[in-house]
Image (cartoon, rainbow, N blue to C red):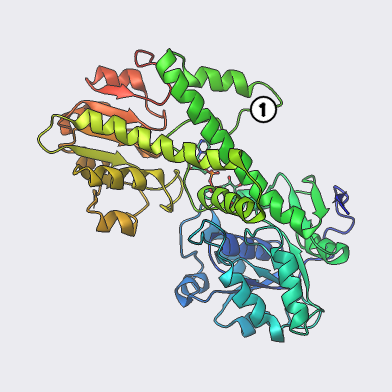
């Protein structure tokens, strides 16, 4: 039976649940942000990761990766003994009332989510404290929480309830997203789902708390990312139409976004989405459909359009460098979006490797991110600064809208480059100024003559 219950908007006893003892397994983006922020709310959190290298920095009051504002939260939580790294799972579970599982669920060979890390943790909960609540925080396909509950019961640990509490944190704003969410979702047996919701009592009281079933909570996470990724793919298709019909996708996006049913966010066209979430989750949803014998043509098209957007970009750049003795392309931006050092599934890397396959020299720059291993082995070079990156290039692609690039004067860039072609893959530069510097700049879905 379908059940969707909204808990009271303002918790009756916001402070009752503070001071709970929690274990968090997985010190990646999701786990560490969750653990550190729950510690900030007043809980005692032990964070464990199978990779000890992720734990050492925590003790020193910082994250093992870049995330805005996270180091401060970790530092304060460690200093007040509310957050501690635990080198073993057994240690993390000591007296824990709740265990958050936030391990990776990467794409398997067929695109489906690889749940092996989840099952390893579930298996290891054999000796967990009695009555502890297991909170699935990782993004997992519908049915995973039920399967976890079955496995626990089969191990004789039916006393451990399973609640699915998906995260909706975006990289770069994860701490803010945690503390000021649009909504919080808790799927599972009512009493335990409410107990997990209570841990978040101090979080933005006006944010709706949705208590639901495990499969609904699990699917909601995939649905949210699929909706957002679909918007990006759709706006990219509209941009491509604008490009050849003389329209300006910025105006079109604004007009469309003014419809309150649609809304203004996530309508920025570009070279495609990347990161550790959209590509993986859209693929996993498509794979889930295939496994269930359900056709999901819209979901499949979201991914196809995304790949095609990067391919279009490659074709445009190849055209631009044709005729040069050895074509050379500079790419500004390795990270999949600004504000992060994360280069996972970044369209810039895909574009760089495709250009390399065509014998074109590629140099990339990023203020924070390092080249992905595939780019290094593919012969892509990394420059220390954007001007050095542009040196001698026949064409320049702006792949990530870092403020550093937006602030650059175009004249020195023009002087460094051999060619004149600039593809503003994020529509972030001042095209009139760049044109004035003698460069031929093109955006995505923007008429070429428009400032
Ligand atoms: C995304 C979701 O936004 C989060 O809500 C979710 O919790 C997270 O995935 C996750 O599943 O953990 P994130 O991957 O950090 O967060 O990044 P976004 O800011 O959503 O951007 C994703 C990609 O879409 C980026 O490559 C970005 O450049 C692209 N994008 C976004 C566009 O091309 N156009 C837009 O208008 C918006």
Q: Is residue 42 visible?
A: no
Query: Image quadrant of ligand 1?
Result: top right
Q: Quadrant of the C terminus?
A: top left
314 with respect to 236 (left or right): left
User: For the image shown, how many numbered marks are present on the structure?
Assistant: 1
Q: Is residue 373 visible?
A: yes
Q: Which residue is mark 1?
A: 262
Query: Image height check: is 450 above or below 266?
Result: above
Q: Quadrant of the N terminus?
A: bottom right
444 with respect to 233 (left or right): left
Query: Which residue sits furthest front?
Result: 293
Query: Image height check: is 181 above or below 233?
Result: below
Q: Can you tell me whether the CB of the residue at mark 1 lies under 8 Å from the nearest atom of ligand 1?
A: no
Residue at 24% of width from left, 33% of height from top?
Answer: 318
Place of residue 421 in the rendered image (x, y in percent of width and height, measured from the top left): 24, 27
Query: Which residue sits furthest left?
Result: 325
Residue at 85% of width from left, 50% of height from top?
Answer: 4
Query: Image height check: is 398 above or below 295?
Result: above
Residue at 24% of width from left, 22% of height from top?
Answer: 439
Secondary-structure class at tag 1: loop
Front position in the image: 109 or 366: 109
Rendering quarter of residue 386: top left
Place of residue 375 in the rendered image (x, y in percent of width and height, measured from the top left): 30, 53
Place of residue 290 in the rendered image (x, y in percent of width and height, measured from the top left): 60, 52
Rendering quarter of residue 126: bottom right
**Mark 1 neighbour density, 10 Å: few (under 14) some (14–19) many (20 or more):** few
Front position in the image: 51 or 286: 286
Front position in the image: 450 or 147: 147
Place of residue 384 in the rendered image (x, y in percent of width and height, measured from the top left): 25, 49
């Amino acid at each position: 039976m379908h059940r969707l219950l909204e808990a009271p908007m303002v918790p009756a006893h916001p402070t009752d649940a503070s001071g709970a003892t929690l274990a968090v397994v997985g010190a990646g983006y999701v786990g560490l942000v969750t653990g550190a922020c729950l510690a900030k709310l007043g809980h005692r959190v032990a964070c464990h990761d199978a990779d000890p290298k992720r734990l050492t920095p925590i003790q020193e009051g910082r994250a093992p990766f870049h995330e805005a504002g996270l180091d401060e939260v970790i530092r304060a939580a460690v200093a007040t003994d509310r957050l501690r790294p635990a080198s073993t799972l057994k240690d993390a579970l000591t007296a824990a009332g709740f265990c958050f599982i936030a391990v990776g669920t990467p794409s398997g060979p067929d695109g489906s989510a690889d749940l092996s890390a989840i099952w390893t943790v579930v298996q290891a909960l054999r000796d967990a404290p009695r009555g502890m609540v297991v909170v699935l925080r990782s993004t997992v396909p519908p049915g995973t929480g039920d399967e976890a509950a079955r496995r626990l019961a089969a191990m004789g640990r039916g006393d451990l309830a399973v609640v699915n509490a998906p995260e909706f944190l975006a990289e770069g704003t994860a701490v803010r997203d945690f503390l000021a969410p649009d909504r919080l979702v808790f799927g599972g047996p009512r009493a335990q789902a409410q107990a997990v919701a209570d841990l978040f009592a101090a979080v933005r009281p006006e944010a709706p708390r949705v208590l639901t079933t495990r499969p609904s909570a699990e699917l909601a996470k995939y649905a949210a990312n699929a909706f957002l990724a679909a918007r990006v793919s759709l706006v990219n298709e509209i941009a491509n139409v604008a490009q050849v019909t003389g329209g300006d996708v910025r105006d079109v996006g604004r007009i469309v976004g003014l419809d309150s049913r649609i809304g203004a966010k996530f309508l920025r066209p570009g070279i495609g989405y990347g990161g550790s979430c959209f590509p993986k989750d859209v693929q996993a949803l498509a794979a889930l459909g295939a496994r269930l014998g359900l056709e999901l043509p819209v979901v499949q098209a979201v991914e196809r359009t995304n790949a095609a957007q990067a391919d279009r970009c490659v074709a445009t750049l190849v055209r631009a460098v044709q005729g040069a003795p050895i074509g050379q392309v500079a790419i500004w931006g390795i990270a999949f979006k600004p504000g992060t050092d994360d280069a996972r599934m970044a369209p810039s890397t895909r574009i760089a490797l495709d250009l390399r396959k065509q014998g074109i020299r590629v140099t990339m720059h990023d203020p924070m991110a390092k080249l992905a291993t595939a780019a290094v082995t593919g012969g892509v070079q990394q420059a220390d600064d954007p001007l050095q990156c542009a040196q001698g290039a026949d064409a320049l692609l702006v792949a990530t809208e870092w403020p550093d690039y937006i602030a650059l004067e175009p004249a020195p860039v023009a002087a460094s480059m051999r060619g004149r072609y600039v593809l503003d893959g994020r529509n972030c530069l001042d095209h009139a100024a760049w044109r004035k510097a003698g460069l031929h700049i093109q955006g995505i879905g923007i008429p070429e003559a428009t400032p």
